[in-house]
Amino acid sequence: MCGIVGYVGEKEATPVLINSLKKLEYRGYDSAGIAVINSVADSDESIIVRKCKGAIKFLEEKIENELVRNAINGNVGIGHTRWATHGEPSDLNAHPHTNVSGTIAIVHNGIIENYAELKAWLQAKGVVFKSQTDTEVIAHLLNYFYTQEDSPSKGDIFKSVQCARQKLVGSYALGVICKDYPDRLICVRKESPLIVGLGQNENFIASDVPAVLEYTRDVLFLEQDEMAVLYCDHVDSYNGDGEKIIRKSFHVDWDLSSAEKGGYAHFMLKEIFEQPKALHDTLAAHIKDGGLTFSQEINPEEFNSMIHNAKRIVITACGTAYHAGMVGKYTFEKFARIPTVVDVASEFRYRDPILDKNDVFIVVSQSGETADTLAALRLAKSKGAKIIAITNCVGSTVSRESDYVIYTLAGPEIAVASTKAYTTQLMCLYMLAIQFGFIRGEIDKDEYRKVLDALQAVSKKAQTILDNQTEIQKFASMQFNKEKIFYIGRQFDSANSLESALKLKEVSYMHCEAFAAGELKHGPIALVDKNTLVIAIATEEALYEKLISNIIEVKSRGAATMVITNDDTGIFNESCDSVISIPKTDFYLESMLSVIPAQLFAYYCSVSRGNDPDKPRNLAKSVTVE
Ligand code: F6R
């Protein structure tokens, strides 16, 4: 949902801003722009703003000549890549936005809910707006507080930001520059994520860590309502009341190569192929002395007592992470025998849920910044539930606000469609489920060890699937024009079907649905005809026969059929046009494997249809607005 960046330092700001923006393009690519405080003293343009509709490459093309001529000079600047909410994607609606005189420029990620009211108020004072965005009101509001004769913040940009934010309702991460303060950049956040990168004689702001990795791995995660002022040689942090505070920096282990394509055509493909390592790393980081350990920061006695007292597990998340939660339900009920419910975060938060201190509330979020997931977390916390977060992002808001954090060690996930985050989330849910089962005496030490061994073997098995991907690539090249695709499965496979269908929808734009296989004949089968492809996921031997009946039902109505299965006896050969084999595992751990062919199928269908799988239309990776 939009990415913002900012730079203060000894270098020319523009190339750094463009470079950093490219790492955030997954957050939006409807338009892009930069603003730089002009270091040429007698220029007409005190702040140089360049912006245009479309991806960052169009902005680059637009300013290419100026860069060659060294015509955009300045060491302090801000940048933005947009996912449009208010106002269509256009040059005018692109950020940065400025005050009328062009002396203050801002970039914004979030939504200003009361913008219409503020706009009317400013228009009544004679302000002429150029764009349809909610963001432009912030630039004019800042100008108002900065220039108004009787304003307590007149001539003081820091105070003007403080005054302006008092008027704003909604969410924002803001970067602000002002021509009268050519040595600094001001930033502030409420709800929307914002980090500060700490370099040597240069400092940065960004919506997410990958944007600054090329320059530094030391970052500050701004907390709710905090502000920071960045200079070339230091950063001052402030709390919501404007008091100076000392913030602890984090060292991020992710390296630059993990945020680059590394020879793959797309980030999505690279991330699919990173799954064996991500699965291995996620598990390895939690194994100690032959058992599981969750974090140095987690007090094991406290953690175990929470596990003992748990009456119910509630898992909440959005999108792919929600699908991981659905598999999680099966794992918790199987290994720990605890009733488990799963909820979409945006639904959970509005239905006055019943929760108490004996409920364990698990939030799953790759980014750790999803607005609905965060709201659900806060609601559960207010009702006394213990919160466990599964997230990929160290220092994210979800990680900071939860009682316990289990990290997926997937590395940065850049492609909009989640792949390695999903399988590592599953790994964490399996780990937690067997820990719950063991501590509660539902599984004994022997079984615990056996499941751990099986979990350890998953990474290699994932590699085997990837080594044999040509079959799925071939199948995609034959099926990418199908009108309708249905995924079906039972139990764990039914949850994985939902994720498989989501992947295909997101990147190929093919109409795809997932059904619990037994539900087909209760309605959806009416949709099946010769333009339909039905993909079955079949990893539970005891349910093979039932699934074969479902496959035959659709086949006899003209559908093409494929199965993703761990069967090695050929039982599906007759009913399916194509059989994609995956290795067998014990203890129903196949969920981490059966989704991989589906991810590859989605990727290859997307490419065959001429789409860019890394940047699916209408989507952005981190949904930090409700
Ligand atoms: C789909 C996808 C989204 C996210 C969802 C939650 O490929 O990536 O459905 O899973 O927006 O995001 P996080 O996990 O960051 O909370």
Image: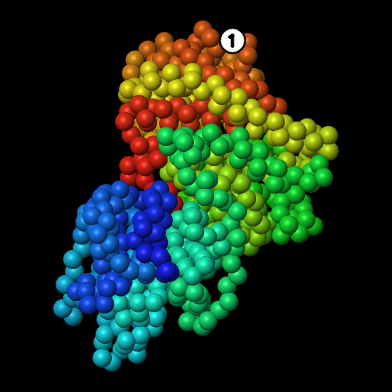
Q: Position of residue 290 (x, y in %)?
A: 81, 41
Furthest-top residue in this view: 574
Quadrant showing the C terminus: bottom left
User: Which residue occupies the foreground of this view, 587 or 183?
Assistant: 183
Q: Is residue 516 visible?
A: no
Q: Residue at x 36, y 45 (%)?
A: 619
Quadrant showing the N terminus: bottom left
**Number of numbered discs overlaid on the protein picture:** 1
In this picture, residue 544 sits left or right of residue 483: right
In this picture, residue 528 sits left or right of residue 581: left
The residue carrying mark 1 is: 570
Q: Is residue 330 visible?
A: yes
User: Does 476 appear above or below 370?
Assistant: above
Q: Residue at x 70, y 34 (%)?
A: 455
Q: Residue at x 49, y 18 (%)?
A: 471
User: Does 402 appear above or below 469?
Assistant: below
User: Which residue occupies the foreground of this view, 97 or 346?
Assistant: 97
User: Which residue occupies the foreground of this view, 379 or 227?
Assistant: 227
Q: Position of residue 308 (x, y in %)?
A: 77, 51
Furthest-bottom residue in this view: 150
Within 8 Å: ligand 1 and the Cβ of disc 1?
Answer: no
Q: Position of residue 61 (x, y in %)?
A: 25, 50
Q: Residue at x 27, y 62 (%)?
A: 70
Identify the amino acid type marked 1.
Gly
Mark 1, other Cα within 10 Å: few <14 / some 14–19 / many ≥20: few
- In this figure, which colouring scheme has been used for the structure? rainbow
Q: Secondary structure at mark 1?
A: loop
Answer with the quarter of the image where residue 117 lies. Answer: bottom left
